[in-house]
Image: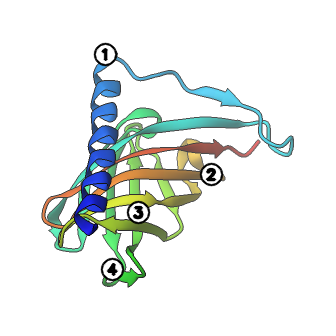
């Protein structure tokens, strides 16, 4: 029964990666940013999305480093804050993100919690990954936002996931 569940999760993860690859090949340019209205308190919000691919071991064994594509494209890293924790059938990673956009703006984030399902001893499917933007420099000074991620964590190689969400800018 456990083998069937692992096979099902592997299939779903493979489909997600396939869709990400197809989406990345569908055009030679980034999709335009779509402005959206928030709840009326701050009409300066926009939807954002893209992908992140990082490798472990570039800085140290607990920190990834790589690139972000899409609306927040640039360089990104994530540092594991302690050992992953087993919670029932899931494994929880606590991560601090470091992000610099292509234009040189820095994004600031609260520590994030990635809830995953183990596929092997070193490979995990991300099932919940809320990421809260708390501000930044340049264009992102005073910005707030919430992103979510879905993808995989490979402790031997790195991470790949899709991010999406909304960023709201100060007036």
- Nearer-the-camera pick, 11 or 131: 11
- Nearer-the-camera pick, 29 or 1: 1
Q: CA distance from mark 3 to mark 2?
A: 14 Å
Mark 3: few/some/many CA within 10 Å (<14, 14-19, 20+) = many
Q: Which mark is residue 28?
A: 1
Mark 2: few/some/many CA within 10 Å (<14, 14-19, 20+) = some
Which residue is label 4 attached to? 84
Closer to the chain start, of discs 3 and 2, is 3
**Which residue is painted at 38% across and 59% down in the image?**
126
Label 1–label 3 contact, CB within 8 A: no
Label 3–label 2 contact, CB within 8 A: no
**Which residue is painted at 35% across and 36% down in the image?**
69
Which residue is label 2 attached to? 145
Mark 2 secondary-structure assignment: strand
Closer to the chain start, of discs 2 and 4, is 4
Q: CA distance from mark 2 to mark 4?
A: 26 Å
Mark 4 secondary-structure assignment: loop
Which residue is label 3 attached to? 97
Percent of width and height locating residue 109? 51, 62
**Which residue is painted at 53% across and 60% down in the image?**
130
Closer to the chain start, of discs 2 and 1, is 1
Q: CA distance from mark 2 to mark 1?
A: 27 Å
Mark 4: few/some/many CA within 10 Å (<14, 14-19, 20+) = some
Q: Residue furthest right?
A: 40
Question: Is 170 located above or below residue 122 in the figure?
Answer: above
């Amino acid at each position: 029964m456990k083998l069937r569940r692992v096979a099902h999760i592997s299939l779903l993860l493979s489909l997600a990666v396939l869709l990400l690859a197809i989406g990345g090949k569908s055009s030679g340019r980034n999709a335009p940013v779509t402005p959206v209205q928030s709840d009326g308190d701050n009409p300066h919000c926009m939807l954002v999305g893209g992908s992140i691919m990082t490798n472990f071991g570039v800085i140290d064994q607990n920190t990834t480093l790589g690139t972000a594509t899409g609306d927040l494209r640039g360089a990104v890293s994530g540092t594991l804050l302690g050992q992953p924790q087993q919670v029932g059938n899931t494994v929880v990673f606590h991560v601090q993100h470091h992000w610099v956009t292509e234009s040189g703006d820095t994004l600031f984030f609260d520590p994030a919690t990635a809830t995953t399902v183990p596929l092997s001893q070193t490979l995990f499917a991300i099932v919940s990954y809320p990421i809260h933007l708390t501000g930044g420099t340049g264009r992102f000074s005073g910005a707030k936002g919430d992103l979510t991620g879905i993808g995989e964590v490979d402790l031997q190689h790195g991470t790949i996931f899709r991010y999406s969400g909304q960023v709201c800018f100060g007036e």
